[in-house]
């Protein structure tokens, strides 16, 4: 099992319960969409998996290890196996697109000779082959999103988390990005994608789960769109 949530609850300081009692298991090589209204807790749930937040209640496992109270010094090794596309990109402005994508490898102490081709290939694939030397502040929202995507993939992670990875790109690029996630999943990575884009979820026919009132429910809500019940 790649990720396990057992009765996980999350309460922000002086906030309401964002997650009440979340249970879910992501098995090796599984692909899941995570949907739910704005503010439902999708980003929070992904942050728990990435160990950027600790659960307030319950038990969390990652790659078969109990990480509910994982000590700080255990985090880098666990995180190296996870590729994340953050909702707000988190690119470093003083680095070029190429350097941003290279960063996980540099941090891991890998020699540039070993990843240079991969970085070029990834940036070319996301349509930024001619913008590799550009600093992020000179890129559009969609271009930044694609740099963040390339950065998440460069270390060939076992688990890929993406938070609204198609939020700033046109429908054609959105579909291309989603297909890339499916391809990565086919090659063995487990994938969790938080998205509002129910059309893409529908079109791709992958399992989805929905956050509602702090709880996780299988599939989209019945009222999400006409026709769901007829197809289900
Ligand atoms: N650091 C924080 N401190 C306190 N409350 C927070 C914090 N981060 C998020 N929240 C609150 O937790 C709830 C869930 O937020 P979260 O960002 O996880 O939702 P989301 O489903 O990702 O929303 P969106 O679709 O808009 O990205 C919201 O009510 C938000 O205001
Ligand atoms: Mg969010």
Image (spheres, grey):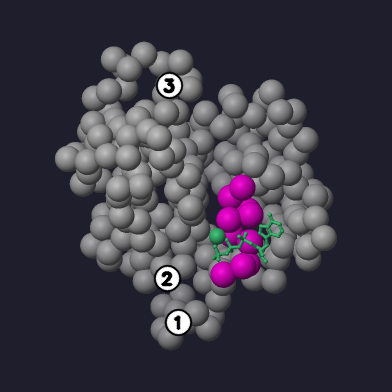
| Mark 2, other Cα within 10 Å: few <14 / some 14–19 / many ≥20 | some
| Mark 1, other Cα within 10 Å: few <14 / some 14–19 / many ≥20 | few
Q: Mark 3 highlights which residue?
A: 106
Dots 2 and 1: beta carbons under 8 Å?
Answer: yes
Dots 3 and 2: beta carbons under 8 Å?
Answer: no
Q: CA distance from mark 2 to mark 1?
A: 9 Å
Dot 1 falls on a residue whose secondary structure is: loop
- The relative height of residue 51 versus residue 17 in the rendered view (above or below) is above
- The relative height of residue 225 versus residue 43 in the rendered view (above or below) is below
| Left/right of residue 101 with respect to residue 109 in the rendered view | left
Q: Mark 1 highlights which residue?
A: 225
Residue 188, visible in the rendered structure = no
Q: Position of residue 77 (x, y in %)?
A: 58, 24
Q: Position of residue 213 (x, y in %)?
A: 69, 71
Q: Is residue 210 magenta-colored?
A: no
Label count reads 3
Quarter holding the N terminus is top right
Please provide the residue range marked out in magenta: 38-47
| Residue lying furthest left | 130
Using the rendered view, name the quadrant where residue 72 is placed.
top right
Dot 2 falls on a residue whose secondary structure is: helix
In the image, what residue occupies the spot 60% across and 41% down? 50
In the image, what residue occupies the spot 36% across and 66% down? 200
Q: Is residue 39 magenta-colored?
A: yes
In the image, what residue occupies the spot 63% across and 54% down? 44
Label located before the other in sequence (1 or 3): 3
């Amino acid at each position: 099992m790649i990720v396990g949530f057992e009765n996980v609850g999350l309460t922000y300081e002086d906030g309401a319960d964002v997650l009440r009692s979340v249970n879910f298991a992501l098995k090796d090589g599984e692909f899941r969409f995570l949907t739910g209204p704005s503010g439902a807790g999708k980003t929070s749930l992904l942050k728990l998996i990435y160990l950027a937040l600790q659960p307030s209640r319950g038990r969390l496992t990652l790659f078969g290890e109990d990480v509910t109270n994982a000590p700080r010094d255990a985090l880098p090794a666990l995180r190296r196996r996870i590729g994340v596309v953050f909702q707000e990109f988190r690119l470093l402005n003083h680095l070029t697109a190429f350097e941003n994508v290279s960063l996980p490898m540099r941090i891991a102490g890998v020699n540039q000779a070993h990843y240079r081709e991969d970085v070029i290939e990834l940036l070319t694939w996301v349509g930024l082959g001619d913008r590799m030397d550009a600093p992020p502040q000179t890129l559009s929202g969609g271009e930044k999103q694609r740099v963040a995507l390339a950065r998440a993939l460069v270390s060939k992670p076992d688990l890929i988390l993406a938070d609204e990875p198609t939020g700033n790109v046109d429908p054609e690029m959105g579909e291309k990005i989603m297909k890339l996630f499916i391809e990565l999943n086919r090659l063995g990575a487990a994938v969790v994608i938080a998205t509002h884009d129910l059309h893409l979820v529908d079109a791709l026919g992958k399992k989805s789960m929905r956050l509602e009132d702090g709880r996780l429910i299988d599939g989209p809500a019945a009222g999400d769109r006409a026709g769901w019940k007829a197809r289900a």
